Amino acid sequence: MVASSITAAMNLGYLTVLREAAGYVGGYLVTNSWGRPLEFRLSTSVQPSRVQLILYGGTLEPYICGELVGKALVEKTATHAQLIVTDCESALELRQRLDTPVVLLKDDPLKSDQPGNGLLGRRGPVFCHPRFPQDAEAASEFLGRLDPAYNLAEPFARIREALSEARKMGAMSRG
Amino acid sequence: MGESSRACRFTVPAKVHRLLMSLGENELSDAETSAVGLALPVEVLSSPRLDPTLKVGVKEARLLGTEPWVRSLGKLGLEVTTESWRFPTPPAEVSDPATPRLDRSVEEPPTRVEMPRRRKGTRLQPPADLVHLKERLLYLLQPPLESLFAGRQVQLPSPPYPYQLEGIAFLMPRTSALLADEMGLGKTMQTILALRLLFHAGLIHRALLVCPKPLVTNWSRELRTWAEDLPFEIIGGDADCRHTSWCISNCPLKLVNYEMLTRDAAIVADEEVRFDVVVLDEAQRIKNRESKTAQVVRNIHRSRSWALTGTPVENRHEDLVNIFAFVDAERIPPETPAKRLPQLTSDCILRRTKEDVLTDLPPKTVRDSYLELTPAQRAAYNLAESQGIIRLNSLGDTITVQHVFELIMRLKQICNFDPATKHSAKLDQLQADLAEVADSGRKAIVFSQWVEPLEYLAGELAAFGPLQFHGRVPNRQRQQVLECFRKDRVKHVLLMSYGTGSVGLNLQFANYVFLFDRWWNPAVEDQAINRAHRIGQKEPVFVTRFISPGTIESRIAEVLEKKRQLFNELIEQNEPPALGMTEDEIFGLFNIRVRPRRTAAPLAA
């Protein structure tokens, strides 16, 4: 018990950005290493205009998911995570704005066109940003310390349900 | 400018002239072919069509409207705002899996539970009346129970059944809950695991478990089995010792029996004694709202109120109302009609039967064994009944239900044994049945309302190694009795009273249950039967209810059957029927004309 209190907390951040009819909506959940929630933050929806679509072009989605929504969610969250996992490929751009390793969790490695480093461990394929190959080792070491039964993909289902609940209760329209 | 000036004259060079001649142009006149010197300047004459004066006309042409078309693109940057919620931090000792992993090589490999595969995990669902988004998110964002139990943090001796996971998920987010599963489905285990997970999540820090005195041992054992990492203390001893436990001890979970709790009513009513959750086991103990026990438990300062009982309605709908006076006093307004109860309480009640969930539990066969009284019993019975009725009628309007009860008791005892000769049709049959049970190496439980018949039976059934478990057996010996019954192969019979042995005991190693006489309440009978027919039972269970035809027993059996319907219809949310056993019904058991002065009221049996 003493050793536990000395050991730094192992927190994971789960970031997802959903593209919905009302725009892009982000949710960020920080859990402890058993998956218990510590803090949850969500964004208002971001709906780009036609002009923004034209002017931003192909950079729009990485910008919204990574720099705009992702960065705002992570930076404003008080509970620090040692590793951020996202299921949104565009949100991987967040890594360029943070010092924390960010990895992408893919459902199916064969479908992935992500050029980053694939870590095909027992937790399924996770990828890091191509400009930060060192994240692979950090993520691998961190994930190796988790309980083998831990399911890295499961918290995203919780985030989606929480976003749905928040939408029902009007939280996402308060921004 | 004149006509002559319109012609243009020019000279033809000699070389050209010769060429034309060679081509046969002989007809050319001399004048037309006269030589002209090429050095002459070319004369240019003006064209008459350019003579008119040019006039410039200007017309308006509307191209884009009255004003130039201008449109602002607005801000090209995008903006977002965020909102967040922070949740309680789990305690450090259960928050880091890395630490035990460091020296895993020298440890025993942890026990892993293979959780049943389900398409979707069992998730906590906040109750409908939880209105704060933060609280709703707190529970929605909890991990599925399967993933918690599959890991090393929450180790279990065996995986819970899916319906038990649902029960845990029902309890955890609720501040007001009544877990009303049928006996034997594991209410104790579901409650312990729900508490354990709430402690782990940092959502509760102090809990109190209240149970009947005979069940303290059972709860202790179950706590050690299902929550080995959860310290608990049993409140007992002298007044100083109990005061220390209530007010000073930091133990997160306290266990106390109803009697001790009532004795310490003044302490637990103190503002300083607060609990995050209070659990009442066998909550039918507070069905009488005015009882001391009910008042004491309602005075405990608490955030969550959970009640456990397989029989939330034993006799009348007020039983449920009075349990809710502890669970959630505001939920049922005064004078609420019975038909509205299911609507008001359904979100707080979880009720499952074995038929609902335990499709793989061995079958339970209930058989009514109608045994004619022996001649000696019949003679004694007829005499007692006729004299009793005469006496009741002679009481006139001074009669009370107590007078009727006395007669009923007397007749029921005769149905068991003839008071003069001790002849008993039931005993004869029981001996025959037990011989089969013993021959097959199995075990049986015999229930009676009274201790005296059990003690007499112990002598008559000596060949089957009878053990006794009733109010006259000291508490300290009871656990030994159960252990002996479980382990000793020659002990085939356990003689139990309904009052002592009908709740909380696990006797799955017995396959036969005999109800030597009938209790007033079918719920209590079910409790008794389910000591054997519960989780862990591997073999079919056979229940035999002895009934003497043409006696008070068969008449009571009819009333009990009707009472079963009351329970089902209130809890299953159908239309509630008439109430349970009333004074009128009790008087109706005999052909007597007299009635007490006051009007009939429901009775708690």
Image (tube, coloured by chain):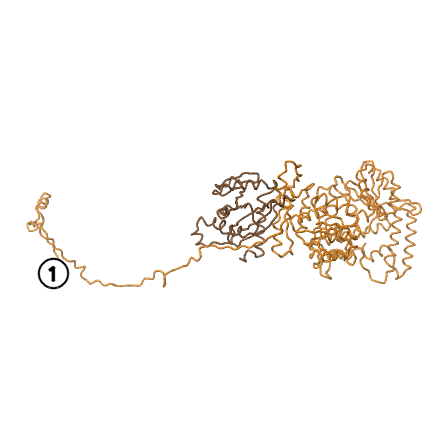
Number of dots carrying numbers:
1
Tell me: residue A117, above or below residue A159.
above
Picture colour for chain B: orange
**What amino acid is found at the position of numbered circle 1 in the picture?**
Gly
Picture quadrant of residue B59: bottom left
Provide residue A88's location: percent of width, then percent of height.
Answer: 52, 46
Q: Nearer the viewer, residue A35 or B113?
A: A35
Name the image quarter holding the C terminus of chain B.
bottom right
Secondary structure category for the residue under label 1:
loop
Name the image quarter holding the N terminus of chain B.
bottom left
Q: Nearer the viewer, residue B49 or B423?
A: B423
In the displayed orientation, state which residue is furthest to the right: B420
Residue at x-position 76% and y-position 45% = B218
- In this picture, residue A70 sits left or right of residue B522: left
Q: Which of B561 and B166 is in front in this view?
A: B166
Picture colour for chain A: brown
- Mark 1 chain: B
Q: Which of A109 and B537 is in front in this view?
A: A109
Provide residue B568's location: percent of width, then percent of height.
Answer: 74, 52
- In this picture, residue B433 sits left or right of residue A13: right
- In this picture, residue A124 sits left or right of residue B217: left
Q: Name the residue under label 1.
A: B2
Residue at x-position 86% and y-position 61% = B596
